[in-house]
Amino acid sequence: MSKKAKDSVPDDSEIILGILNGSKDILERVYKSYFPMILKLIVSNNGDEDEAKDIFQESIIVLYNKIKCGNFQLNSKLNTFIYSVCRRLWLKRLSQKGKYSGSLTDFSELVAVDEDLAYHLGKEKQFTQMAEALVLLGEPCKTIIIDYYINNHSMQEICDKFGYTNADNVKTQKYKCLQRLKKLFFKNLKNDRNEE
Amino acid sequence: MKSEIEIITLTEAYYRAELSMEERSAFEKMREDPEIDSQVVSHYNLMKQISDYGNYQYLRADMETIHDQLDVASLMDELIPAETKIRTLWRKNRINAAVAASVAILAAFLTVLSSGYFNGPTTDPNYNYLNRKVDNIVRSQQQINQKINSSSIEIENPSRFAATGFALSTNGYIMTNYHVVNGADSIYVQNFDGESFKANVIYTDVIYDIAILLIEDNNFTPFTSLPYTIKKSGSEMGDEVYTLGYPRDTPVYTKGYISAQTGYKDGISDTTTYQVTLPVNPGNSGGPVLDSRGNIIGIVSAKQKQVEGATFAIKSEYLVKSIQTMQDSLDHSLVLNKKNSLSGLNKTDQVKKMKKYIFMVKSY
């Protein structure tokens, strides 16, 4: 089999594998292959290129969430999935703007994406709350948490970066930071639930 | 009993694969205590929530980088038809356009005002001259009109549009399509014997595409009776129907059947019409559609393009409805015929009796 050109449309199983492995190359090829379709959808239906970008990127996040939580089944083609998600997101945006005219010009077939969007909505809410909690946490806690839990730095690296005298001090500091983050994050979540 | 900080440290080390084999199995054994296990699980979930959030941020950043490499402008050119682009451009700039337009209108208005346009009737001699000229034109046009009216309408004055209509009552009411008479200056109807009569539009119904004319011509002798009635109820799919119309200069008989209970308009089905399989031509518009017993069940309205034989006929129920709404406002009473004298006859005799009451409608 010949090797595929870098910007060719990757096949669906290749994409899923690439996403699971966190491949940037796959992300780039997915992005470049599917963005034009969504640009066409949004611009043909009262939107502009910036809105197309927002909607498309959100649909990629939906796709990542779906694949990463491991229950992705190839019931439909990926491009149909992305198209359907974007279509729903755009309909929602249009009705929020009060601009929905009752019909969309379509360029693809559709699949049901309700569950994925509901899951995505919940995830999105958690992300916002995490972002808010991290801001409220302040420095140096924020960086310690990010370095350790997101960038996967070791305690020793963090110790060196912040100039702590020994790793045990960092461990205590990190523990305190984490307790505060927990409080902020879950308080936010709880508040939010109470409001609903 | 382990402290919380120890459990957290162990959990993290476990999931980051920093434990030795022995430490791993010790940790797993420790998790057999449900209370400890629940602490491990909840800490693991928090770790995951933080790292998910991080991945999400990185994903967004990566997408931004990729997006910046795209040439969106040329993608737009490639994908979007020019018409849509103009719409987008219009939407983006309409406020500017509106401001520009208001400024332009204001400027024009001020210019006109300053030129003295509103300063009462002008005494400019050129103006009077122009006025006289207009008078002359009006006069010559009246002369032309008189000439036209005094001479009978002949073939050298071909009508803009010819279609079909049928008598609704004995005293000269004729029904045809709205689209036949729409925009016409004057209308003549011609009977089977080739006699033309002047007719006026009395009533139009744009929605059902119906127009009712009245012959207002001294040469017209009212009918003694009409042979057909208008059916007030619906007809069934498969019913045999026929029409008589003027696609040419002589009446033409065409037969067919009702092929669907609904017609088709602007891409949706239209319950006010039947689809009939009846090979008709444009001149058949406005012609009556009769069933085998000589009841008018509809009026030929439109032919679907590209589909051979698919014709639409406005249902007679709506014809009756239209007539009822306009009946009260008439100077000449419109009495619909109640007695059908065609029902016992065969087709040939029906057509023979019918043709007297079918008119060619010529609009100019």
Image (spheres, helix red, strand yellow):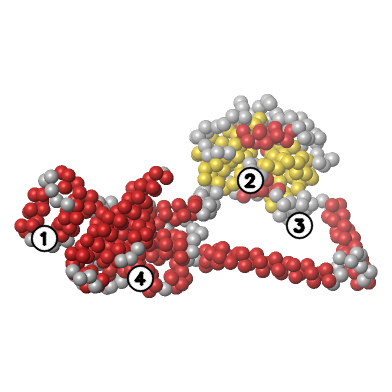
Mark 2 and mark 4 on one chain: yes
Image spot of residue B204 (x, y percent): 70, 43
Locate residue B310 relative to residue A127 in the image: left or right.
right
Cα distance, mark 3 to mark 4?
Answer: 73 Å
Cα distance, mark 4 to mark 1?
Answer: 38 Å
Q: What residue appears at the point 57 percent right and 43 percent down from the top-left corner?
A: B312
List the residue tagged with mark 4: B66
Cα distance, mark 2 to mark 3?
Answer: 23 Å
Q: Nearer the viewer, mark 2 or mark 3?
A: 2
Cα distance, mark 2 to mark 4?
Answer: 61 Å
Image spot of residue B48 (x, y percent): 25, 56
- Three-letter amino acid code at disc 4? Ile
Is disc 4 placed on a helix, strand or loop?
helix
Cα distance, mark 3 to mark 1?
Answer: 107 Å
Of the residues under marks 3 and 1, which one precedes in the sequence? 1
Of the numbered discs in the image, which one, if any, rests on residue B19?
1
Near-viewer residue (A184 or B177): A184
Of the numbered discs in the image, which one, if any, rests on residue B285?
2
Q: Residue furthest left?
A: B22
Q: What residue appears at the point 42 percent right and 58 percent down from the top-left corner?
A: A107
Of the residues under marks 2 and 1, which one precedes in the sequence? 1
Label 2 marks which chain's residue?
Answer: B
Q: Nearer the viewer, mark 2 or mark 4?
A: 4
